[in-house]
Amino acid sequence: MEESHRYTFTAGLKAGTSIAIGYFPIALTFGLLAKTTGLSVIEATAMSILVFAGAAQYISLSLIAAGVSPAVIVINTFIVNIRHFLMTASLNEKMEPDAVWKKALYAFGVTDETFSVLATRKEDRIRTPFAAGVILIAYSSWVIFTAVGHRIGANLPLFLQAAMSIALYAMFVGLLVPSMKGNRKVVMLALTAALVNSLFYFTGWLSTGWAILAATLISAVFIEYVYARKGKS
Amino acid sequence: MDTWYWWMIIGMAVVTYVPRAIPLTFLEGRELPRPVQNVLRNIPYAVLGALIFPAIFFVQENIWFGIIGAAAAFGLAFSGANVMVVVLGSIAVLAGFSLLL
C-alpha cells in the first residue's frame, strides 16, 4: 500500500514535468515584469504563492501599472478564472472519492495546465497522490521561477524566450492528439470549441476568460446533443 | 507598495480559489444526472481545443513562430511522440528557426 502510494505521487511528479518546463519562462518573465512594475520580490512571489493563476497575474500587473483600482483588479481576476469552475466540475467526475479536506487542498492547484494533464489520463479514476504530484511540481516551478525572475532581473536569451513561448501550447497539443486518434467525438469537441473560441477572439465579442468558458461549454453541450440524437435514431 | 496591495492579492486569491474549490468539495459523493455527466466528460477535449486555438498562433509578434510551432507540435504528436518530446521538440524547432532569423 505504502509502495503504491509512493509510486502514484512520483508518477504525478513525472507527468507534471512538462508543465514545470512550460511555466519556467512564463514565471521568469512574470517576476521580471513585477519588478519593473515596482513590486518587491516578496510581493511578487507572494502573488504566485497565493493566487497561482498565470493569465490573471499578468493582467493584474498591467492594471497596477495603469493605476486601476484594486477592487477592479480583483473582479477582473474573478472573470479571468471563472472557467476553472467548469474544469473542476469535470475533474470531480474523474478523481477518486476522497476526504473533502484533501479535495479542498488540491483544488487550489487546478490550473488550465494541471487540469489538462489530469483530465486526459487514460485511467478511469485518478488517485489523489497522483494529482498532488502533478500539482506540486507545477506549483513549485511557478513560485520558484517567479522569485528567480525578480532576483536576477533579466530574461532568457531572446531566441530561447521566443522558442519557449510555444511550450504550454505544445503540451496541450501533445495531450489532445493521442485522444483524437480513432475518436471522432474528441476531434469534433476540440474542433468546435476551437472554432467558437476563434470566432469570439476575432470578433472581440467576449474577453479571453469568458470566451474560453463559453466556447468549451457550447462545444461540450452541442456535441453531446448531436451524439445523443444519433444514438436514438 | 502599501497595504492595499496585500488586500488585493488576498482578494485575488479568494476569487481564484472559490471557483476551483466549490465543484470538487460540494459535488463529492453526489451522483449527477447522466446527461450532465456526459457533458462534463466532454469538457477536457473542448477546453483543449479552446486553449490551443487561436492562441497558439500568437505566441510571438511574428506569426511564423506560431505557425511553425503549431506545425511542429501537431507533427510530433501525430507521429506518436509523448508529451515531453512534443514540448521539447517544438521548442527545439523554434529555437532553430529563431536563430536563422
Image (cartoon, coloured by chain):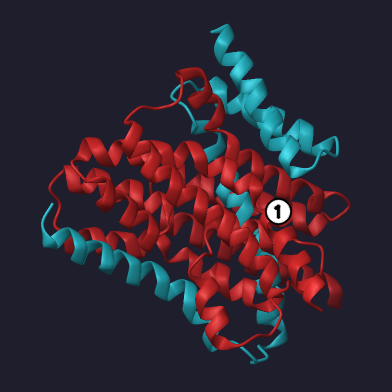
Chain colours: A red, B cyan
Q: Which residue is mark 1?
A: A15
Front-most of residues A52 and A124:
A52
Q: Residue at the spot x=68%, y=32% of the render?
A: B88
* Number of numbered markers: 1
Quadrant (top left, top right, bottom left, bottom right) of the C terminus of chain A: bottom right
Residue A186 position by quadrant:
bottom right
Left/right of residue B53 with respect to residue A1 in the rendered view: left
Secondary element at tag 1: helix
Residue B2 position by quadrant:
bottom left
Q: Residue at the spot x=65%, y=31% of the render?
A: B70
Position of A167 relative to A136 (above/below): above
Residue A14, position in %: x, y? Answer: 71, 52
Residue B49, position in %: x, y? Answer: 63, 50
Q: Amino acid at mark 1?
A: Ala
Residue extending farthest to the top is: B100
Residue A216, position in %: x, y? Answer: 57, 60
Left/right of residue A188 with respect to residue B9 in the rendered view: right
Front-most of residues A122 and A6:
A6
Position of B13 relative to A66 (above/below): below
Q: Can the viewer see residue B101?
A: yes
Q: Residues within 10 Å of mark 1 (few under 14, many from 20)?
A: many
Left/right of residue B54 with respect to residue B92 in the rendered view: left
Residue A50 position by quadrant:
bottom left
Position of A168 relative to A128 (above/below): above
Front-most of residues A196 and B67:
B67
Residue extending farthest to the bottom is: B30
Residue A6, position in %: x, y? Answer: 74, 68
Left/right of residue A44 with respect to residue B59 in the rendered view: left
- Check the residue under mark 1 and report the chain it is in: A
Quadrant (top left, top right, bottom left, bottom right) of the N terminus of chain A: bottom right
Q: Can the viewer see residue B24?
A: no
Q: Residue at the spot x=48%, y=72% of the render?
A: B20
